[in-house]
Image: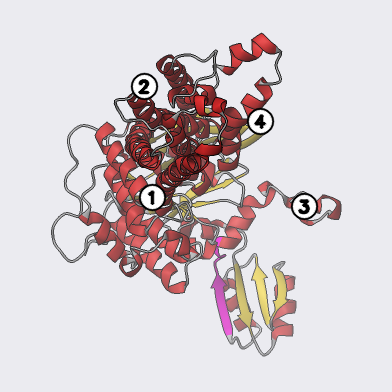
């Protein structure tokens, strides 16, 4: 009796398929990974919830205080931004951490070895991971952005002004913030490929997104503005419709962000190939 | 078939694996023995293409691991039992591996049955005992029904039943014509499981030979003699220049075979209650082979250096 077959006489594994394992197989494998870890689903759910909760609270507070707000505050009030800010900040943090975890957890638990034993072509493994993560986060982030927008605008009833999707720049801000969140998540994933440790990668990501702006703000005047507009946080602010005066346009900024992400992921791919797993 | 040729791995100043060459044949269980830190795991990782050799190469079925078309269908490996995401179920773990090499999903459940984890297949692997993790690791190794198995300490953490199960499994897999390469620090277990052993120490090749040969060759071979007139026999043996030692009321004799001792006893005459030739255990043979190469030997002796390890 064969040791590896069970009682059915059929061959245990169908004969070897033609060709080689490829992108489709690895995408399925990565999707199975996402699906089978509960914390991933929890984090995605949390990102949605926090986004929606913040989008409910901020406009609600604004409406309640509208009567006592100063004229200048009223003038600078931007209904689109207020409804998106929660999803934007919460998403930046949570989807960033999720991006880090999908990579760093492989190193922390040692599953990276099982992964690379199943598929030794490492850049292809990274590509599959990036595609699956991008698809999942894009769906969640766009859903969070649109839901936040509609919820926020519904709560911003008179006397405070509110926007609709056809308001100027609104659709760009809502759809764009979903895209932005997807890309910063990928940036975080790329940092985790480089750093390989969860805590280190989170420090790197938070440092890049939140701490670097503080350091840059200490630079002398004109230089500060030159550097600041290159930072993800400024790019994100421009995207959700509240750009600082020197900021790049939302899509120019988005391209810069994509550039950072591509650079970090490419560097990650090189190191992934070179380093021992 | 696994081949290694001048396989070398250097970490900074330290040579973890030093010019290792061997061939692991199909159809038998080959044990991989060496003290802790002797480079067994590093060697296995290099065969798997996970660590890059500093020099030399390793192939599986004549090809570099990187070039295998469906790696899990050719090589099954258990490197670390606990290398499982604690939040993923046993079934999820096997499914994500199966998907990567287009292995049918029903195979996942077959294997969960085979390793006895079917009833906990949906539980998070983080709750698993070391023994359960080992079983899951073995299931993962067998997932693609591979012709080559590379297992690093597969019985670690298993209870006696589990150890016996692994032994029968490995022997069965080898009997089916597969290549089975298995490391262990439990020499007694290797003596029962392996047909042949590769022994390394400090990353260097020491020996590759059948287990029977290895234990037979060792100078640790001796004859145990019990007799009510032990003193008389003892004196006669010393006259014959045999090395003797008393142990638990028996005489341990080296340098004379049991036939010669029996003849000597008859000529005295001395009554014998026991006359047994003992081949050295694999463990003793192994200790002898690796004595010079035990890495952290000094740490046990010098209290000043004890803190290093």
Q: Is residue A240 magenta?
A: no
Residue A65 appears in view: yes
The x and y percentages for residue B2 are: 38, 40
- Label 2 CA crowd tier, 10 Å (few <14, some 14–19, many 20+): some
Disc on the earlier residue, 2 or 1: 1
The x and y percentages for residue B269 are: 64, 86
- In the drawing, what numbered circle is on residue A173? none
> Residue A181 falls in which quadrant of the image?
top left
| Residue that appears at 43% across and 18% down | A250
Q: Which residue is mark 4?
A: B12
- In the drawing, what numbered circle is on residue B299? 3
| Residue that appears at 54% across and 61% down | B187
Q: Is residue B276 magenta?
A: yes
Q: Chain of mark 3?
A: B
Of labels 4 and 3, the one closer to you: 4
- In the drawing, what numbered circle is on residue A169? 2
Check the image and report above or below for A201 versus B129.
Answer: above
């Amino acid at each position: 009796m064969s040791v590896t077959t069970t009682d059915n006489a059929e061959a245990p594994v169908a004969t070897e398929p033609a060709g080689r394992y490829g992108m489709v197989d690895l995408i399925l494998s990565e999707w199975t990974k996402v699906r089978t870890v509960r914390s991933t689903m929890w984090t995605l759910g949390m990102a949605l919830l926090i986004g929606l909760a913040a989008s409910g609270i901020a406009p609600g507070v604004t409406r309640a205080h509208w009567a006592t707000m100063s004229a200048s505050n009223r003038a600078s009030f931007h209904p689109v931004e207020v409804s998106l800010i929660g999803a934007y900040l919460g998403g930046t943090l949570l989807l960033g951490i999720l991006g880090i975890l999908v990579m760093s957890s492989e190193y922390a638990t040692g599953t990276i070895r099982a992964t690379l034993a199943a598929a030794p072509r490492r850049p292809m493994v990274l590509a599959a991971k990036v595609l699956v993560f991008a698809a999942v986060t894009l769906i969640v982030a766009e859903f969070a952005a649109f839901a936040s927008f509609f919820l926020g605008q519904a709560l911003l009833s008179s006397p405070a002004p509110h926007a609709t999707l056809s308001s100027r720049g609104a659709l760009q801000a809502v759809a764009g913030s979903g895209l932005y969140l997807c890309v910063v998540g990928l940036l975080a994933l790329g940092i985790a490929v480089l750093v390989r440790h969860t805590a280190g990668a989170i420090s790197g990501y938070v440092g890049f997104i939140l701490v670097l702006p503080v350091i840059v703000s200490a630079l002398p005047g004109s230089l500060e503005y030159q550097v600041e507009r290159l930072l993800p946080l400024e790019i994100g602010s421009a995207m959700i419709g509240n750009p600082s005066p020197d900021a790049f346009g939302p899509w120019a900024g988005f391209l810069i962000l994509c550039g950072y992400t591509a650079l970090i992921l490419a560097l990650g791919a090189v190191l992934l190939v070179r380093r021992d797993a | 078939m696994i081949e290694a040729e001048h396989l070398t791995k250097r970490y900074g100043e330290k040579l973890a694996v030093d010019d290792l060459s061997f061939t692991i044949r199909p159809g038998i269980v080959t044990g991989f023995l060496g003290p802790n830190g002797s480079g067994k795991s590093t060697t296995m990782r290099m065969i798997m293409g996970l660590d890059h050799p500093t020099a030399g190469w390793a192939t599986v079925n004549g090809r570099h691991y990187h070039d295998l078309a469906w790696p899990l269908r050719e090589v099954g490996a258990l490197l670390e039992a606990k290398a499982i995401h604690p939040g993923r179920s046993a079934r999820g773990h096997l499914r994500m591996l199966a998907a990567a090499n287009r292995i049918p999903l029903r195979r996942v459940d077959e294997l969960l049955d085979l390793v006895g984890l079917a009833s906990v297949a949906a539980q998070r692997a983080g709750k698993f005992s070391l023994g359960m993790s080992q079983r899951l690791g073995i299931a993962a190794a067998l997932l693609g029904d591979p012709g080559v198995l590379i297992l690093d300490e597969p019985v670690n953490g298993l209870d006696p039943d589990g150890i016996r199960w692994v032994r029968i499994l490995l022997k069965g897999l080898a009997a089916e014509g597969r290549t089975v390469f298995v490391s262990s620090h439990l020499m007694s277990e290797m003596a029962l499981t392996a047909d042949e052993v590769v022994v390394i120490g400090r990353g260097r090749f020491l020996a590759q030979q059948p287990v029977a040969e290895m234990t037979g060759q060792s100078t640790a071979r001796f004859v145990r003699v019990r007799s009510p007139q032990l003193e008389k026999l003892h004196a006669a043996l010393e006259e014959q220049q045999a090395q003797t030692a008393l142990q638990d009321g028996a005489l341990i004799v080296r340098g004379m075979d049991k036939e010669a001792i029996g003849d000597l006893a008859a000529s005295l005459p001395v009554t014998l209650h026991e006359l047994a030739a003992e081949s050295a255990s694999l463990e003793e043979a192994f200790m002898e082979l690796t004595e010079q190469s035990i890495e952290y030997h000094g740490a046990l002796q010098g209290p000043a250096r004890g803190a290093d390890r």
